[in-house]
Amino acid sequence: MTKELLSQQKVSSFSTPASSIKTEHASQSLTLLERISVNQITTYHWSFKESLNGLLSAGIPAVGLWNRKVLDLEPAEAAELVIDSGMKVSTVSLAGGFTGCNEYAFEDAIADAIQLICFGGQVNAAAIQVASGPRAGHTLNHARDLTMEALKRLGDVASLTGTRLALKTMRSPQARHWTFLNSLHATLELIDACGHPAVGLALEPSLLLTEDNPEQLLAEIMPLIASVQISDWDSTEELITQFPQLDLLEMIHDSGYKGFYDLEVWSDQIWQSDYESLLSRVRHACQTEASHFE
């Protein structure tokens, strides 16, 4: 992946209002606590409304919405709850499945994704997370072609609703149910081949650990980063003294990322934990590291 592949119109096109945090003090640097988001996947057993109330009580400024929670309500009711809460929305998850996994037809996946994107526009979401779907018996090239066609069509919808698509990378074993994109570079190559200004990247910071020169890569791909998803959180520690992967978050921040850091943890241990205690620890960790993001 070279700078040339990621240049052209993308650098300017991706500098959209939806890609950064809207604040009355836009000229001031925000602390980590002001940029943290907690995804509803992390608080798995809370209802849609419980998650909003829990985050508000904990002083968490933003939420990542999960489609399954949205569908527990009418989308209009869910949107009204978000708007009335005053919470910012980092992402809405999860559109995709374009490869026909679970006998899900391509056009059905497109239709569901359009509904999710329109909902994201209603709640002013910065990004809509997208997972391609696994190969599902296709050749790799065919799976890529299906995903690119979907992203181009959905990118047009995202542009009209003022949001962006954030394509996810997942590593095995989790990936086998969700996507054939198992490496950062494979995802970047597909985004580049797609060539749509509303199609960006959902970056998992730990993926940078395998890069020889992560700072250089970040400088090249920064215009493409639509969301940052933090998946590592050790609930066994008695006291959080440093935010997980803080050095990587600092690197992303220093490279110019202005959006939210969304805590999206897929873990039975976290899902069975005390969510109020978890959010208190998240807030404490953010406050401890606040100076790093000023």
Image (cartoon, rainbow, N blue to C red):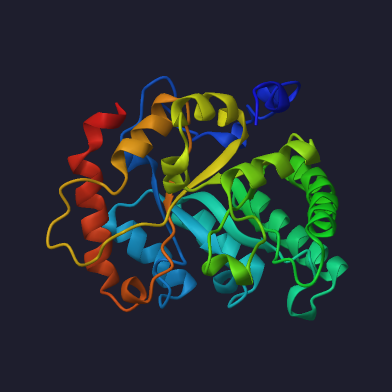
Residue 66's spot in the image, x, y percent? 55, 65
Is 105 left, or right, of 219 in this rendering?
right
Q: In which quadrant will I find the N terminus?
A: top right
Residue 105's spot in the image, x, y percent? 84, 73
Taking 9 as reference, is 39 above or below it?
A: below
Residue drawn 58% across the image and 57% down it? 92
Residue 25's spot in the image, x, y percent? 40, 25
Q: Nearer the viewer, residue 279 or 131?
A: 131
Residue drawn 37% across the image and 76% down it? 268
Residue drawn 76% across the image and 72% down it? 136
Q: Nearer the viewer, residue 254 or 15?
A: 254
Q: Quadrant of residue 163?
A: top right
- The tally of labels here is 0
Q: In which quadrant will I find the C terminus?
A: top left
Q: Is residue 207 visible?
A: yes
Residue most extreme to the left: 238
Is 19 left, or right, of 242 in this rendering?
right
Taking 77 as reference, is 89 above or below it?
A: above
Residue drawn 37% across the image and 38% down it? 249
Residue 34's spot in the image, x, y percent? 35, 40
Q: Nearer the viewer, residue 132 or 263?
A: 132
